[in-house]
Image: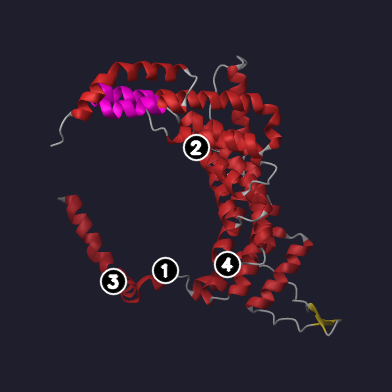
Amino acid sequence: MHARWNWRHQLRRWGPRLAPLAWLFVVTGCETLTTPDWYLALQRPRVELPPPQAAEVIQAGLWTSDQPPEPGTLAGDCVSAKILFQRGEYEKAEQVFGWLASKAEKEKNQEVLEEALYHQGECLFQMRKYPKANDCFVKLLKVNPSTRYRSEAVKREFEIAQHWLEVTRQAMRDWREFEEGKRWVVIPRLIHFEKEMPWFDAENHTLKLFETIYTQDPTGPEAVQALYLAGGINYFRERYQDADTFYSLIVENYPKSPLAPQALELAIQSKINQIGGTDYDGRKLVEARQMVDLALRSFPELREKEEFLKRTLFSVTEQQAEKDFKTAEFYRRTHHPGAAYFYYEIVRRRYAGTPWAEKAMARIMEIRGAVEEEAARPVD
């Protein structure tokens, strides 16, 4: 009773005070969630800004100085913050750019928002605060996908992802030592306290960042490498379906890339590793066979691995023949001799010269009489 009375007492005490705020939220909706002006004024960094300088532009083939923006405005403070950035005062410049980004976003000033987000990310990158820098670059490309800083931002994202990838590379080295008997156990490192790294699950952040790089700039120079490295992470973790997706994208969309032959070889292996045996879905067998044919026909870079590819093709053919033969066996056991005959004939013709073709021929001779009886039976 005492706890209930205390709860009601607190509700009677604070309810009237919070009611105006609740009413304001209901009336104005989600707009109340935007940062108010008074809060932005309080958050303004106490950094002494240098006076903005005039920008030099070309007019009629001559360099002329444009009028500098007025100090205290978004444009003026942005120019002043750039001066701090050029001086190498990254910590001060980052504070100003972060504040300018919030204010420009509220005032819907896209030009200043673009400048502030990019330069804030650059300041954080120079201070090696990679997670926060990456957030700025991702937000910049989300707010303005066609920004003039797109190539620079994607390049920075790729450099950050390369740094985070060292976690997976170290895990690969640890597992190799474990397999060689040089290590008793492999302990995954999930938590990081360095400012350069995400504090939890850096590998997953790296994988998502590679995917983001590809979607943000699929025609850029980093797109193919991002796909290849993302496929490598998934292949190492034995997520072969995801690895197959990334490697196949390289083969299909970037066939002239230097990474395409290696991606093709790894895509074939990923497809084969997805096959759980002849009792499972055989579509990956068909895709693997098509890719082996493509490798033998269109990629002379893989010529030194021709013997390996031929062995792979033989293995795939063997599995396909076994799968079709088992299908025929199923129809034979369930007393459908016509369907069984059809599949035995497929095995005999498609895989001629193999033991499965000989087995299929023996079954055809065995069920020939049942097939003729079924064919002569009147149809209901």
Report helix, strand or loop for mark 3: helix
Residue ID for mark 3: 19
Image x and y of residue 228, in percent: 61, 41
Mark 1 belongs to which amino acid?
Answer: Leu
Q: Answer yes or no: do the residues labelled 4 and 2 have beta carbons within 8 Å? A: no
The residue mark sitting in front, 3 or 2, is 2
Q: What residue span does the magenta drawing correspond to?
A: 323-346
- Tell me which label, 3 or 4, sits earlier in the chain: 3
Locate residue 306 relative to residue 275 in the image: left or right: right
- Tell me which label, 3 or 2, sits earlier in the chain: 3
Question: Could you say which quadrant of the image residue 303 lies in?
Answer: top right
Mark 3 belongs to which amino acid?
Answer: Ala
Residue ID for mark 4: 144
Q: Nearer the viewer, residue 148 or 122?
A: 148
Residue 33 image label: 1
The residue mark sitting in front, 1 or 3, is 1
- Tell me which label, 4 or 2, sits earlier in the chain: 4
Packing grade of label 4 (10 A; few <14, some 14-19, many >=20) is some
Locate residue 177 relative to residue 275 in the image: left or right: right
Instruction: Work out how far the residue at label 1 is from the one at label 2, CA to CA, in angstroms.
Output: 51 Å
